[in-house]
Amino acid sequence: MPNKHDPKIIAGNANQPLAKAVARRMGMHRGERVNLVDTRVERFNDAEIFVEVYENVRGEDMFIIQSTSNPANDNLMELLIMTDALRRSSAARITAVIPYFGYARQDRRTKARTPITAKMVANMMVSAGIERVLTMDLHAAQIQGFFDIPVDNLYASPVFALDIRQHFKDMGKITV
């Protein structure tokens, strides 16, 4: 039987397959099926994004899985609007799982009169109500400092290295 405090997963359009795989893996770990939170994310005729959460998430620990990859603007807005929908639905805590953090390359001013867009995006996420960010292989470590909330920057290379070692016994013939 699910615990009231088990995390719930909501998926944006950028990472549906990943979100389903995470839910499946959580279910295997818990010995029961884990479903994504029933949500509708659609576009109006003028391309505005609309999100509706069909389940009660009051008091729940929510994880939004959504990259801000291409199309970066659409995927970022989808993340922010999903966050707002969860916040207005009284979710207890919102963690954004962002496998690819768009705008990360704009982490500093390269010349006069240019923005630090990664910082602005961090501000937008915090303002929307995200309370923790989990991401992979940030372009630059200092981006973690752009947030006023905890940021976990995970690295994929140890996982890849382990997988390569397990599947390719003759390491002398591997080029990466």
Image (spheres, rainbow, N blue to C red):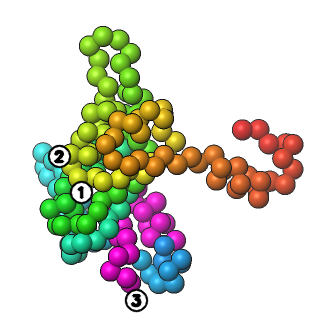
Residue 42 occupies quadrant: bottom left
Identify the amino acid type marked 2.
Answer: Ala
Q: Which residue is found at the position 30% from the left and 54% from the top?
A: 131
* Residue 56: in magenta span: no
Q: How far apart are marks 1 and 2 (CA)?
A: 16 Å
Residue nearer the viewer, 149 or 135: 149
Identify the amino acid type marked 1.
Answer: Met
Identify the amino acid type marked 3.
Answer: Met
On the image, the x and y values in percent for residue 18 come to 46, 60
Furthest-top residue in view? 112
- Residue tagged by mark 3? 1
Q: Are marks 1 and 3 in contact (CB under 8 Å)?
A: no
- Residue tagged by mark 1? 82
Q: Nearer the viewer, mark 3 or mark 2?
A: 3
Q: Which residue is found at the position 35% from the left and 70% from the top?
A: 8
Q: Considering the numbered disc 3 on the image, is that residue within a helix, a strand or a loop?
A: loop
On the image, the x and y values in percent for residue 82 come to 24, 57
Rendered position, 136 above or below 7: above
Q: Considering the numbered disc 2 on the image, is that residue within a helix, a strand or a loop?
A: loop
Q: Which residue is found at the position 30% from the left and 59% from the top?
A: 94
Q: Distance between the residues labelled 3 and 2?
A: 40 Å
The stretch of residues the image draws in magenta is 1-25
Q: Which residue is found at the position 23% from the left and 66% from the top?
A: 91
